[in-house]
Structures are given as C-alpha cells and as structure tokens.
Amino acid sequence: MRRPLVISAVFYTIGILAAYRFQLSLFWLNGLAAAGVLLGFLCLKNQKAFCIVFSCFVFFLGMAALRNAVTISKTDISRFVEWSSTKPYVVRGFIAHKPLLKDHKATFLFQTQFIKSADVFTSCSGQILVSLKTKQGFVYAEELILRGQLRQLQFFGRGVRLRMQVKTDADCLRLRTIKGFWLKRCALALADKMEQLIFRYIPSPVAGILDAMILGEKRHLPGFINTLMMKTGTLHILVVSGFNVGIVSLISWMILKSLRVPRPWRYGLMIICLVLYCFMTGACTPVVRATIMASCYILGILARKEPDIHNSFALAWLFILLWNPLQLFEAGFQLSFASVAALIYAYPKLRAICRIRSLRHKVLKFLAEAFLVSFSCWMATAGLIIHYFQIFSPVTVLANIGIVPLATLITLCGFCFMGIASVCPALAPVFANTCILGAMLLIKANALLSSLPFACLTVQWQS
C-alpha cells in the first residue's frame, strides 16, 4: 500500500463526516471497527483485500471517534449538576491551561477531579471554564478548590460545556500542588519570562504585535491592527504557525551546530525545542501541525531517508483528529491544513504550468514563485474566509509577497532580541529598536495595501 498514512487520513476523515451526518450507536461502531481488525489479519496475504478491509476499519474508527467525542461520559461533571438549582458547587482539580489575567480577572480552563455533593467529594471528570475576580496570579497545573455556580456554556469548544463564576478570593483555596506535564510547565514559565522581556524593552503597540507573532498572545494586540490585517488577508502572520516553527528549527540548529553537538543529539534536541515551543504558544492547531511535520522531516534526515511530505502532512492530520475529531469542524484547523495542502498539491502543478524553471532572471524567477505560493494559499483559503468571516480580499495575493518576508525578519529579530536581552541586557535596546522599525513598516504596509481600491470586500449572506 503506497502512502498508507494518506489513505488512512482520507478514510478516517470520511468516517468523521459520516458520523456527523448519520447517527449510529457507538456500540455497533466499535464492533464494526473490531471486526475490521480481525478481517485484516485474515487478509494479510491478499494485498487488495487487505487494503479494502483496512480502509473500512479506518472509516468505522473515524465514525466511532466522533461519536465518542460527543458522548458525555458517566463521570462527566455535567451529570452532577442540577440545572434548576441555584446553589453553589465546590469542585477540586487543577488549572489545565495557561490562565488569562486581565483587568483583575483570571480566566482559565479547569480540569475537575472531584465535586462536592451532600458534603462528600465525588470523583468526576471534564473541564470547566472558570472566571475569578482576583488580583492574584495563577499558573498552569496549580491545584485549587473552587466554590461557585455552574452554568451551561452556549458555545463550547475543546469539550468544555460548563462555566463557573467564582466571586472572590475567599471562594478559592490554593493547594499549591503542582500537577500537569512537566515539560509544559517549563514551557509556559519560559513563555512568561519572554513576554516580560518584550514589554520591558518595547513600547506598545509594537510589544503587542511581537507578543502575538512570537508567543501567540493576542490580549495586548490593539484592535485597529487586527482589523487592518484582516482587511489585507495577512492576519495569519499574527498567528503562530508553520513559519515560526521553521525559524525555531533554524535557530536551534545553528546554536547546536556552533556548540558542536553530535549529529544524533543535535536532531533530538531540535525536536525537544520544537515541542517546547509548541507548548509555549498554547499548542494551537497550526503549531501542532507544523511541529509534527518538522519532526518527521528531522527524523527522516537522522535516519538518512528522504522525508515524504505527503505522509508527514497526513500524520499531522491524523494526530490532531485522533486527539479531538471535532477539530475537523473548526476554522483554525481548516485554514491551516488548506493552506499547507495548497503548497503541497497545487503549487507544484501551477509552477509546472507556468514553466517557472525556464525563467533565467533570478529576481523575476523569485517574484514569480512568490506570487504562485501566495496565489495557491489564497485560492485554497478564500472560500473558507468568506464562509467564516464574510470577507473577500483580492489584495491578499499581493500583500503576502511583501509582508510575509517582512514578518519573517521581524520574528527573527524578535527571537534574537530575547536571546540578547537574557544574556546581555545592555545590547537589548539595539535589537528592540530593530523590532520596532520592522513592526512600524508592517503597519504602514498594511495600511497602504488596505487603502487600495477593492482591497477588501464584505460578503453579505442572504438568509
């Protein structure tokens, strides 16, 4: 079977879509998937029959995964809540993600472990969204006992169905027990220190731009910049994505090579750096996808085999959907994979049709390739952007040619600035001024492009 990961990704996705359309019992889906495994063993000697059985197995596995994702478990915290009651609940657990602290209010995802019912703590599971009025700081994996009212979320993501409003610090007991994954704790602590360096040496709004581009934090990003970049279709540069992972790979490789780290250790440490950066930026879909694909490429080089970008793309697709099949229906997942799919499948064909290789002038060849890359991604994502944001930006093709390289330079300068600021603070203002200059150019370029005729058109849906 050629490229089994690609075939698996296709049939697994079809299974998720089928389960979304047709309601089947999880019991029967698990039974069909198990039957597929048994038939697969019986058909090992017949390659064609094995491929058919394997595809059916992956299809039913996708259906079962979606049904399991939307099925509420018996221990889920929502099963212990009486919706008609206004009484407060007491829950125990730990902070499952980096808390958002703004305007004396902390908001975070809370992994519940126990809920108090009839003066007895009962074991439970599931995450809730917690809001707490406080001036204190909280960290990921900190264990807490919270008291407050539980309400159902109207729109929920990541399987979060409930929210809890905690009124005062008196309703929050901090146990100081640190749980969670140790590498994620280290990554988030490092991200906090990097964010402090950015705001110590760089003024707003440039600090907010750099914070978004490097660490994926948008809470300090001014609204007018977000609107400006949405109009030009360059909002993706404010989202930590594949090119950030590429920069981290390049920087880590250069540092490790300059330190003369042996080849196997060098590539292993590069993968650890990528995973660390993935946790630092909140493990959003574009970064997880890029981290998996980059790790596959590094492992291929280490094994002295030519990496297959199709299989690494399919592996990233499968990994994210195996973790959470509902990601398939989210805009971030669709936009991220659509743009990469365009680069893998559409761009080479467009390059061959336009005969880019026949161009001898290097500058003209570079501009033609940059145009085709931008055009491929724009064509792949334009429909999704219209659907989710009701915006059509023809200027995006032109904007990406100049703004993406500028954003890359800004991100490189940002990483260099934070490295210099940590080691030699006296030189930090020099690199900070370079970042400020780059960010101002970025704002000016977007303002100029957005002022062009028909740069951004609003698409109104008729109901």
Image: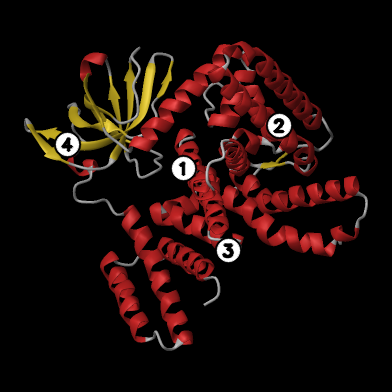
Q: Nearer the viewer, mark 4 or mark 1?
A: 1
| Separation of residues labelled 1 and 3 (CA atoms) | 21 Å
Q: Amino acid at mark 4?
A: Phe
- Labelled disc at residue 305: 3
Q: Which residue matches tag 2?
A: 409
Q: Nearer the viewer, mark 4 or mark 2?
A: 2
Q: Residue 257 sits in which quadrant?
A: top right
Q: Residue at x 17, y 27 (%)?
A: 87
In the rendered view, does 41 fall on the left or right side of 171?
Answer: right
Comes first in the chain, label 3 or label 4: 4
In the displayed image of the protein, which residue is found farthest to the left? 119
Comes first in the chain, label 2 or label 3: 3
Secondary structure of the residue carrying numbered label 3: loop
| Separation of residues labelled 4 and 1 (CA atoms) | 34 Å
In the rendered view, does 25 fall on the left or right side of 323?
Answer: left
Q: Work out whether residue 148 can be spotted.
A: no
Q: Position of residue 9 (x, y in %)?
A: 49, 64
In the rendered view, does 327 fall on the left or right side of 241?
Answer: left
Secondary structure of the residue carrying numbered label 1: helix
Residues 218 and 388: in front is: 218
Q: Residue at x 77, y 31 (%)?
A: 450
